[in-house]
Image (cartoon, rainbow, N blue to C red):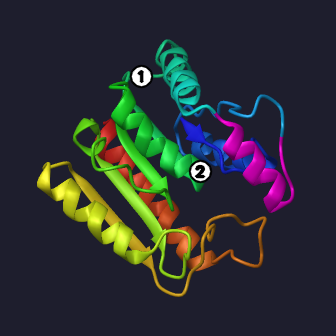
């Protein structure tokens, strides 16, 4: 399951879904903005702010049940991967639903401390060390809290990178080396936990 950035279900996410398919996964990217997309940060922020978190988590859970019911999905283990807003929603999804056996969050905001004990899947967190929207102290605290609850996780922070470094359609932030390594780690994480 792929969870979009705040830009919406744009061609970049569609291409990442195809990359997962070429790597042997069945990939589904639900359109959480129901057809709307943004090209400017202010538009994207409005779309993201208009989301009802409970409704979105229900939609992701419904999409997971749809995916799980597909004949091509065997064994019936699913992972969730998200970027930016979608990274935070990927983390929320594994606290909301037991349908996922692994999660990967690219620059996803940590959950509130009260939600952390509800996380039900191993989590790989991928972060940029020059990401001003998610300070290193937040990641360190999240790591500490996950350790307290014995939730399997690994966090990788890429030096010299900025928020959205995986998005190759954004040359101002894209980092080819970090993106390649993060992709390899994502595939390895999913293969390890999805069997």
Q: Residue at x 49, y 69 (%)?
A: 134
Percent across and percent down for residue 70 are 53, 14
User: In this rendering, is residue 127 above or below 12?
Assistant: below
The relative height of residue 54 versus residue 113 in the rendered view (above or below) is above
Q: Toward the viewer: 91 or 122?
A: 91
How far apart in space, not on screen, are marks 1 and 2 (Cα)? 29 Å
Provide the residue designation for mark 1: 74
Query: Quick check: can you spot residue 7?
Result: no
- Mark whose residue sits in front, 1 or 2: 2
| Other residues around mark 1 within 10 Å, as few (<14) / some (14–19) / many (≥20) | some
In the rendered image, residue 48 lying in the magenta stretch gets the answer yes
Q: Secondary structure at mark 1?
A: loop
Q: Earlier in the sequence, mark 1 or mark 2?
A: 1
Which residue of the protein is positioned furthest toward the bottom in this rendering? 160
Q: Which mark is residue 106?
A: none
Q: Quick one: label 2, few (<14), some, or many (20+) residues within 10 Å? A: many
Q: Nearer the viewer, residue 172 or 114?
A: 114
Q: Which span of residues is magenta-colored?
A: 37-51
Disc 2 is placed on an element classified as helix
Look at mark 2 in the image and give the residue it sits on. Answer: 85
């Amino acid at each position: 399951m792929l969870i979009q950035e705040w830009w919406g279900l744009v061609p970049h996410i569609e291409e990442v879904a195809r990359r997962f398919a070429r790597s042997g996964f069945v990939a589904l990217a639900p359109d959480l903005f129901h057809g709307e997309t943004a090209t400017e940060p202010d538009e994207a922020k409005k779309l993201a702010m208009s989301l009802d978190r409970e409704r979105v988590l229900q939609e992701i859970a419904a999409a997971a049940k749809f995916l799980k019911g597909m004949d091509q999905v065997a064994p019936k283990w699913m992972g969730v991967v998200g970027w930016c807003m979608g990274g935070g929603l990927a983390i929320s999804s594994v606290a909301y639903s037991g349908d996922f056996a692994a999660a990967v969050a690219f620059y996803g905001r940590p959950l509130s401390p009260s939600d952390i004990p509800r996380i039900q899947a191993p989590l790989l967190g991928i972060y940029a060390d020059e990401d001003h929207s998610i300070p290193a102290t937040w990641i360190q605290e999240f790591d500490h809290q996950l350790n307290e609850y014995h939730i399997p996780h690994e966090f990788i922070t890429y030096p010299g990178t900025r928020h959205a470094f995986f998005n190759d359609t954004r040359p101002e932030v894209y980092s080819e080396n970090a993106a390649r390594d993060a992709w390899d780690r994502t595939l390895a994480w999913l293969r390890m936990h999805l069997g």
